[in-house]
Amino acid sequence: MQIGILYALLAYIIWGLLPLYIKSLHGIAPAEILLHRMVWSLVFLGIILAGRRQWSWLGKVMKDRRLLAGFTASAALLCGNWFLYIWAVSANRVVDASLGYFINPLFSVLLGVVFLHERLRPAQWLSIAVAAAGVIWLTVAAGQLPWIALALAATFGGYGLLRKTGALGALEGLSLETLLLFPLAAAALGYLLFTGQDGFTHAAPGTQFLLLMAGPVTAVPLLFFAAGARRIPLSLLGLLQYTGPTLQLLLGVWLWHEPFPAQKQIGYALIWISLAMYAAEGLWMSARQKPSAINAGNEPT
């Protein structure tokens, strides 16, 4: 349990501090950062797979058209999520991006209801209604939808839905997704380098090194997350996931002094309340079910 908590926290802390990495890539356009992330992620994951001699799944996957179609869709959503997040951080919209990952768990719940026919309890519906009220408040206060947050939640929620129904583990799934994205990413990056329109060759050595580290920065937290998810209950994992967007929000407000007026704070507060309600209801139901399971196990057979 303790090592599982540590793995999960490390994953969420790395994701929460990701804006620091993106902000350090001075002079590199968001699209080029995305291309480097896709290319070097595959290289890094390939090294891991080679070290573990974990290749047998690849041949079977390439013969399964339905699985390939599903992972092509998840790769497209992942690519869109990565680009939007990189752009938001580069455009000094870290606070808005953090909202997307606060909303994402509840958005994922709704996707589960719509596509997987999962059922929600009344308290869970109430928490979603409170979150919707927060989004409506932010829309009215700003005069427009919080589109960055909603797009991030939608792309990552959709990605999670496809991965939940996919038949590959975390390492194999991400490897396949980056493999599917690699040809386009490598071709686009090669074109930028050949035509001199890239930022990599003109960047400082430190920035170049950070770009080459895009693979580990992408894959390591995912591997930590997968290791943690196997060791701790889903309810605890759900609580820990708010570490990431909380760190992002604090970085945006305190380090980069992004505007966070009272009107926006009210909308965020409603969403935080909805998350607290959802988490508390889940913990309460879990606590109620444990005695029932114990009593059932003690019944004579």
Image (spheres, rainbow, N blue to C red):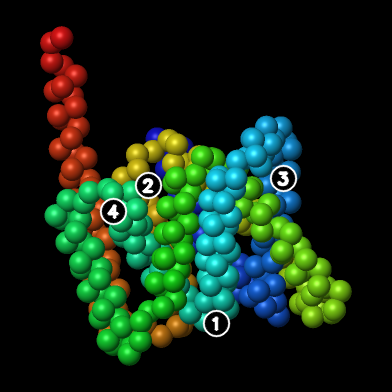
**Residue at 19% from the left image edge and 39% from the top image edge:** 287
Which numbered dot is residue 46?
Answer: 3
Q: Earlier in the sequence, mark 1 or mark 3?
A: 3
**Residue at 52% from the left image edge and 66% from the top image edge:** 81
- At numbered mark 3, what does the secondary structure look like: helix, strand or loop? helix
Q: Earlier in the sequence, mark 4 or mark 3?
A: 3
Q: Amino acid at mark 2?
A: Leu
**Residue at 15% from the left image edge and 22% from the top image edge:** 296
| On screen, residue 148 above or below 156 | below
Q: Which-is-in-front pick, marks 1 and 4?
A: 4
Q: CA distance from mark 1 to mark 3?
A: 32 Å
Q: Specify the quadrant that holds the C terminus.
A: top left
Which numbered dot is residue 113?
Answer: 4
Q: Residues within 10 Å of mark 4 (few under 14, many from 20)?
A: few
Q: Are marks 2 and 4 in contact (CB under 8 Å)?
A: no
Residue 98 place in picture, x, y as percent: 42, 70
Residue 20 place in picture, x, y as percent: 57, 69
Does residue 241 appear anywhere in the picture?
yes
Quarter of the figure with residue 235: top left
